[in-house]
Image (cartoon, helix red, strand yellow):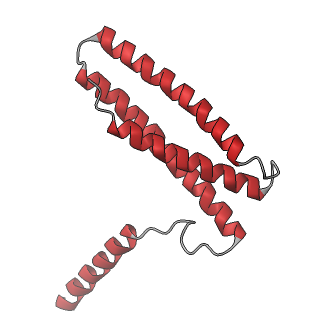
Amino acid sequence: MRSMVGLTLLLLAFGAVAEEEESTPCDNVETDQQTYECAKYSRQTAERELDAAFNDQLERIKEQYNGQTAQIDDLSRRLRDAQALWKQLRDADCKVETFAEKPGSKAFETAQNTCLAQRSDDRSEYLQSLGLQ
């Protein structure tokens, strides 16, 4: 019985370590296909984090201006407008960065996904740093 408990604890500890070290398509990238998959994964991850940072900022506005509907609405609108303009700039910048690649090619998609991921990561950091007053 004692060895069974020890084995169970060992398996639980191993499982916890395995969860912490979740593998991604960006682990051990060596081929062009792996680079493509990593760029696609990075973009998807960055865009999810960007959406979360944006929604978190909207929630912080509601908390900061609790009960002040006019201020909440005005600042939320400004943030949404800024986000829409930022997306236009991000997309335009990425069109410049991917100009040399043939649209539709894996090289183009890899470059585009990498650019969008980098810009989205930067924007997430910016949104998280806002201390609206």
As drawn, the residue found furthest toward the left would be 2
Percent across and percent down for residue 31 are 69, 73
Describe residue 59's horizontal placement relative to residue 104 as left or right. left
Seen from the viewer's position, the closer of residues 52 and 102 is: 102
Percent across and percent down for residue 77 are 44, 17
Describe residue 85's horizontal placement relative to residue 99 as left or right. left
Above or below for 64 versus 10: above
Determine the residue positioned at 39% across, 73% down: 18
Percent across and percent down for residue 50 are 47, 41
Determine the residue positioned at 57% across, 66% down: 25
Percent across and percent down for residue 116 are 59, 46
Above or below for 75 versus 129: above
Determine the residue positioned at 76% across, 46% down: 99
Above or below for 78 versus 55: above
Describe residue 42's horizontal placement relative to residue 57 as left or right. right
> Can you say which quadrant of the picture contains the N terminus?
bottom left
Quadrant housing residue 54? top left
As drawn, the residue found furthest toward the top would be 70
Count of picture labels? 0
Determine the residue positioned at 64% across, 37% down: 91
> Can you say which quadrant of the picture contains the C terminus?
top left
Above or below for 30 versus 47: below
Describe residue 72's horizontal placement relative to residue 37 as left or right. left
Seen from the viewer's position, the closer of residues 98 and 33 is: 98
